[in-house]
Every structure is written in structure tokens, then in C-alpha cells.
Image (tube, rainbow, N blue to C red):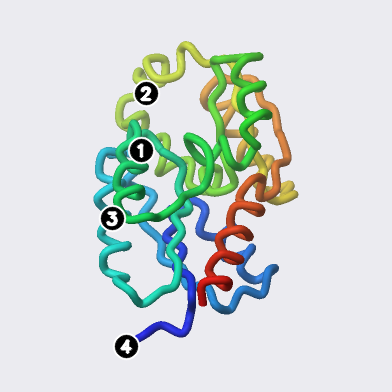
């Protein structure tokens, strides 16, 4: 059965809310979304195969496919499988890169390399995706092992939420890091998804 949507966006679940919000704002009813679990970031070598499987399953049901991922620790392997299939992705190495903007992110890194970043999603799921996955809940001594060389936590905020800001501040305190907040909104996701949507409409 053919899809009525000309474009499929395959997205990491960590930014699925933002992608869906942009879909609503752009009134892109011709866009379908499929999310891949954020848990794969603990095993980034599995991300390329998971994305490739989604693309191959879609077959020729879409005029265009776009991938809402950065490289995300795949060391170029994601780009290799995307190039094989003629599919583009979001710019940058990871979500911090394209949410903050590549120039802004590099500036923050140059200013203070020992920076740990949280997004809205990571702040909401900090306990599971940071504390539990790293085993700090079971072995508190690992906190120093993982974060001993960090000096600050930067909360890259997609929304102006006082509640999330306080949660991110609490996360910084728990990790023993200085807290800073930078409002990013959707960052470079906006022009990248708009360009993908326009290309899909042009092809249809």
C-alpha cells in the first residue's frame, strides 16, 4: 500500500518531539515520522544498521527520505550507509551540534572543553539515560570516574521552561558541575527539515 506522504523522516527519539513540532508549525501534513529508540546512543555502532533497516523497509513508498540524526558517535558509518541509499541527514556530529548551531557549539567547546550538555529530552530523562545507564545509581564511586574532568553543565534549552531549567540545574548539582543555560530553540533543524520538505514536494 502506497503512502500518501511524499517524505519520511527517520528520527532519533531524543528529538522526535522537536521534529513533530516543526511538522505542525510548517503544516507539513505530507510528512511521516518514524522514531528509533534513544537507547541506541549507549551502543552507537548499532545506529547505522537501525537507520538502514528503516530506509530499506520504506522501499519506494516515499518520494523522499530524510534522517534526523547527527553522526552520533558512529565514526562516519551512518554517513556511509546513507550515501549508499542516497539519503541526507541533519548537519553536525550530534544533537548538541545542530541544536546549538555548529559555530556556537564549537565556541562553547573551545571556551571550556570540559562541558557536559543536556537537551530538553536528556533533562527529562536524566536519571535513566545518564545515572542508570552509566551505573552511577548502583556504584556512586563511578561519578568521579565519568565526570571528574568536567567543569560545567550547559543546558541547551529547546523550550523556555522554568521546570526543565530547574531539573537541569539539579542535574548539574548532582554531578558537581557549574550550571549554565543556553536557549537554542530548534537550531539548525529548522532550515534542514524545511529544505528536505521542499525537495520532497518538488519531487512529488
Quick check: marks 3 and 2 in contact, CB under 8 Å?
Answer: no
Quadrant showing the N terminus: bottom left
Quick check: marks 4 and 1 in contact, CB under 8 Å?
Answer: no
In terms of secondary structure, where does tag 1 sit?
A: helix
Q: 125 or 103: nearer the eye? A: 103
Q: Which mark is residue 52?
A: 3
Residue at the image position 70 percent from the left and 51 percent from the top: 159
Q: What residue does disc 1 label?
A: 132
- Mark 3 vs 4, N-terminal side: 4
Q: Residue 115, percent across and down?
A: 56, 21
Q: What residue does disc 4 label?
A: 1
Q: Which mark is residue 154?
A: none
Q: Residue 6, percent across and down?
A: 48, 75
Q: What residue does disc 2 label?
A: 140
Q: Residue 4, percent across and down?
A: 46, 85
Query: Alpha carbon of mark 1 to alpha carbon of mark 2: how far?
Result: 11 Å
Query: Alpha carbon of mark 3 to alpha carbon of mark 4: how far?
Result: 21 Å
Amino acid at each position: 500500500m502506497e503512502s500518501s506522504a511524499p517524505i519520511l523522516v527517520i528520527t532519533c527519539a531524543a528529538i522526535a518531539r522537536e521534529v513533530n513540532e516543526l511538522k505542525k508549525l510548517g503544516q507539513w501534513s505530507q510528512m511521516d515520522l518514524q522514531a528509533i529508540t534513544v537507547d541506541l546512543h549507549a551502543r552507537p555502532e548499532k545506529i547505522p544498521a537501525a537507520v538502514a533497516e528503516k530506509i530499506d523497509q520504506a522501499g519506494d513508498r516515499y518520494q523522499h527520505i530524510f534522517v534526523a540524526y547527527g553522526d552520533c558517535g558512529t565514526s562516519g558509518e551512518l554517513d556511509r550507509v546513507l550515501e549508499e541509499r542516497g539519503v541526507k541527514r541533519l548537519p553536525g556530529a550530534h544533537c548538541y551540534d545542530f541544536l546549538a548551531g555548529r559555530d556556537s557549539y564549537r565556541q562553547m567547546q573551545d571556551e571550556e572543553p570540559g562541558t557536559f550538555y543536556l537537551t530538553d529530552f536528556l533533562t527529562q530523562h536524566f536519571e535513566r539515560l545518564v545515572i542508570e545507564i552509566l551505573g552511577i545509581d548502583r556504584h556512586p564511586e563511578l561519578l568521579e570516574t565519568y565526570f571528574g574532568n568536567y567543569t560545567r553543565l550547559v543546558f541547551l534549552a529547546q523550550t523556555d521552561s522554568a521546570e526543565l531549567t530547574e531539573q537541569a540545574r539539579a542535574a548539574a548539582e548532582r554531578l558537581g558541575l557549574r550550571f549554565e543555560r543556553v536557549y537554542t530553540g530548534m537550531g539548525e533543524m529548522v532550515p534542514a527539515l524545511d529544505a528536505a520538505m521542499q525537495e520532497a514536494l518538488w519531487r512529488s
